[in-house]
Image (cartoon, rainbow, N blue to C red):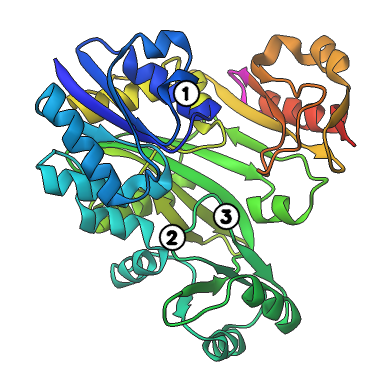
Amino acid sequence: MAFVIYTTPNYTDNAVRFIRTISHLEGVRFSLISQEPKEWLPLDIQSKLVDFQQVDDVFDASQLEAAAKLLMARQGKIHRILGAVEQTQIPVAQVREVLGIEGMDVETATNFRDKGRMKNLLQEAGLPCARHRKVTSKKAALDFAGYIGFPLIVKPPDGAASQSTFRANNFIELEWALSHNPPSPAHEVLMEEFILGDEFSFDTFSLNGQPVFHSLTKYFPNPLEVIREPWIQWQVLLPREIDIPIYDDIKQAAFKTLDTLGMKTGMSHLEWFRRNDGGIAISEVAARPPGAQITTLISRANDFDCVAAWARLMIFGEFPSLERKYAVGAAYLRGQGSGKVQAIYGLEKVQTEIGHLICDVKIPQIGQEKSLSYEGEGYIILRHPETSIVKEALSRVVSTVRVVLG
């Protein structure tokens, strides 16, 4: 049986989903490295653990390596070591190289994690992406802004999910962004043009350097706008019609991007824009499964378990043959105001009008703390064979359901 280690800092709902899926796979002896004690896990997962190692910092490669060595000494050769959190990709790759474990190497992981390096590689390969520059001083940042103009984006080169990302529309807003993320020789800051257009993702499963499956989602509106405007109820749509001419350009660019960055076997999450002039621009790509319930959307659209498929791909090099049967969409329920959830309005109306389309739901709980994520306090996922019906139903949800904080 394959001895597999999974790494995670803590037991979020998404982390538990991944842990449970891998721990229950046939042919796998499962172990876990985490910052939290195993006793915090659900009992069905604890019963599947053959071993466990707690560390202070799962993002520290030396601690991760020491933990993996202890597990290997007790359990034998490690077949795979995995992690789905963006910030663990390089430390996990470092452990692979030290212990001779198959999987993505450090150079490739860095290509995906360092967004400035990534964009340089893409530009050298002739791939369309945002104009950008790494800066190490406030003067360099102001010079780049004077050259490229506004609006522009300020963010860390190794950011994830729009974390610590700011949009600046003028020099005053740029000064504010730089005060929150000051550049220095020891702390590079990535600046890039703000692309005007519609934002999408392009998610790919690759095996031995070849894409074996792809999916696509559209964001309503772009995540940065959602972050800036707390009242906006975010939506993500996965259309049934993906392999059509309008998406041929991004499909070709996405596959070339993965080849350029060195993807061999794994799942990737690429974010891209359709510019207002019709062209495309690649924003960035991560070498991991996507968040924001996109794995659930992919699962429902194709009637399979996306997380289990990722795990089997990574561990056994297998991937199923799939047929896209549905369009799927997620409406994220964001509370209005601050504090805890006080009331939820409109759920009964939505259930009456479009309940037959609902396939997954997470209803905010009274007393629940406000989420730190722009995804909000809950979500409703809808499915139907016709994309237009799902899109219209998403609009119905976000215009009807209201979560009040206080």
State how many labels appear.
Answer: 3
Q: Which mark is residue 163?
A: 3
Q: Amino acid at mark 1?
A: Val
Residue name at image x 60 percent, y 88 percent: 142
Q: Amino acid at mark 2?
A: Asp
| Residues tagged 1 and 3 counted as in contact (Cβ below 8 A) | no
| Residues tagged 2 and 1 counted as in contact (Cβ below 8 A) | no
Instruction: From the top left corner, tell me how far across and down residue 344 is, in percent.
Output: 87, 24
Residue name at image x 33 percent, y 20 percent: 22
Q: Which mark is residue 16?
A: 1
Instruction: From the top left corner, tell me how far across and down residue 340 is, in percent.
Output: 82, 33
Q: Secondary structure at mark 2?
A: loop
For marks 2 and 1, give the CA distance.
24 Å
Q: Secondary structure at mark 1?
A: helix
Circle 2 or circle 1, nearest the eye: 1
Q: For the residue carrying disc 1, how many other residues have a C-alpha within 10 Å: few (<14), some (14-19), or many (20+)? A: some
Q: Secondary structure at mark 3?
A: loop
Q: Which residue is mark 2?
A: 158
Residue name at image x 60 percent, y 68 percent: 194
Q: Earlier in the sequence, mark 2 or mark 1?
A: 1
